[in-house]
Image (cartoon, helix red, strand yellow):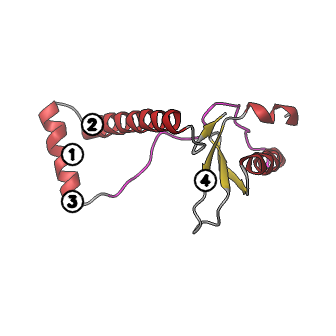
Amino acid sequence: MSYSNLSKYPFEIRPLSKEEGGGYMISFTDFSECISDGETIAAAIENGMDALQETIAALESLNMPVPEPGSGGTYSGKFIQRVPKTIHSRLVMRAKQEGGSMNSLVTSMLAESLGKREYDLTKHLKSNRGNNLLLH
């Protein structure tokens, strides 16, 4: 892979709390194993690009696939989450009431919640002109 294409990979940046050491953390949505940080946003991006280059080189050296930019990585679409019995029971009851499966119900609830959070975050950033999250 040409390392000049690194800038095509989307990333997210978030501020780190004092407890986390301060500065900013960068993560790449196509690589769950690739994160870095820096004292400033610019330093986090620079360090992140170095980490991304090393991650891609490691994958290539192991003859493992390198995700295409914007592909979302290699997520299977499956995860397991333990919940209290009371929540499990409520989900089963709600799914029955709505005439669908619990899996469909939970997927719908997660998608709706993520959409609302993204909308709220975008609205907050526009009103405060903050740098809490940058998407490339």
Q: Which of marks 3 and 4 is nearer the N terminus?
A: 4
Q: What residue is rendered at 60% in x and 53% in y?
A: 15
- Give the spatial CA distance, label 3 vs label 4: 35 Å
Asked whether residue 17 is drawn in magenta, I would say: no
| Main secondary structure found in the magenta portion | loop
Residue 98: image x %, image y %?
Answer: 16, 31
Q: Earlier in the sequence, mark 3 or mark 1?
A: 3
Q: Answer with left or right where residue 33 lies relative to residue 97.
A: right
Q: Earlier in the sequence, mark 3 or mark 2?
A: 3
Disc 2 residue type? Leu
Disc 3 residue type? Lys
**Of 29 and 79, which appears nearest the observer?**
29
- Give the spatial CA distance, label 3 vs label 1: 10 Å
Mark 4 surroundings within 10 Å by alpha-carbon count, few (fewer than 14), some (14 through 19), many (20 or more):
many
Residue 13: image x %, image y %?
Answer: 63, 46
In which quadrant will I find the C terminus? top right
- The answer, for residue 2, to whether it is visible in the render is no
**Of 48 and 83, which appears nearest the observer?**
48
Residue 79: image x %, image y %?
Answer: 44, 48
Q: Mark 3 points at which residue?
A: 85
Q: Is residue 100 above or below residue 84?
A: above
Q: Earlier in the sequence, mark 2 or mark 1?
A: 1
Q: What stretch is highlighted in magenta?
A: 62-82
Q: In this view, does 118 lie above or below 38?
A: above
Disc 4 residue type? Pro
Mark 1 surroundings within 10 Å by alpha-carbon count, few (fewer than 14), some (14 through 19), many (20 or more):
some
Q: Mark 2 points at which residue?
A: 105
Q: Name the residue under label 4.
A: 15
Q: Mark 1 points at which residue?
A: 91
- Give the spatial CA distance, label 2 vs label 1: 8 Å
Q: Which of marks 4 and 2 is nearer the N terminus?
A: 4
Disc 2 secondary structure class: helix
